[in-house]
Image: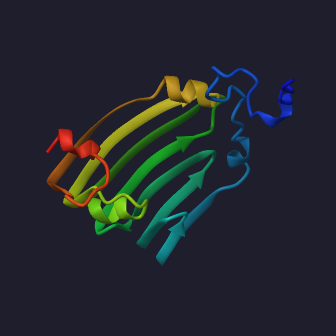
Amino acid sequence: HQSKPRNNLYAYKNEFQHWPRSPINLTYMNLFDADVELTTQHVIFNKLKFNQLKLNAGLQKGKLKIHQATGNIFGGKIGLGGILNAKTKINQIETQFYLDGLNLPSALNTFQDRTLNSGTLDFSGNLSTNGRNVVELISRLNGVGSVAFKNLGISSSSQHVSAFASIT
């Protein structure tokens, strides 16, 4: 006889509900104003090491503006800018981002994937959305972007077929 798992072991009871519907409350962003300038040599997040990070952001009356967020990762340059508006009951997000010249073998090697022996990635885009919860934010996501893979070389020593084999 197999026992039934307890409901409190699951984040969601409904297996088809992937995104939370509970409201995202950002009203605290209306309680203070702030300006932030940060420069650091390194930040490590899980297996990712970001170098030469610079952040310039401001929070005014519930509106967070990221004027500049730049750095380096895996030999490439990253950047992000955007606005998070929590002034109204419906949160609004607008972002612009780029990643230029990311060294794909170095990035994949961080996750023990050695399918590529050369290649770079350029990626950029603009996204916007609004909503009171994650379901609304995801379902209303809108934007444009571009991806470019350059000089990809599939490693002959790889133990499995690379997903990149179909695009090289």
Left or right: 27, with 60 as reference point: right
The colour scheme applied to this rendered structure is: rainbow
Residue drawn at x 63%, y 47% is 61
Q: Please say if 134 is above or below 159.
A: above
Which sits in the foreground, 71 or 32?
71
Q: On the image, which quarter does residue 8 sit in?
A: top right
Residue drawn at x 71%, y 20% is 14
Q: Residue furthest front?
A: 1
Which sits in the foreground, 113 or 95?
113
Image quadrant where one finds the N terminus: top right
Q: Residue furthest bottom?
A: 41
Which sits in the foreground, 67 or 79?
79
Left or right: 83, with 89 as reference point: left
Left or right: 25, with 137 as reference point: right
Image quadrant where one finds the C terminus: top left
Residue 45: % across, % down: 54, 64
Residue 144: % across, % down: 30, 34
Residue 73 in view, yes or no: yes
Residue 39: % across, % down: 47, 75
Left or right: 7, with 109 as reference point: right
Residue drawn at x 15%, y 53% is 150
Residue 40 in view, yes or no: no
Residue 40: % across, % down: 48, 77
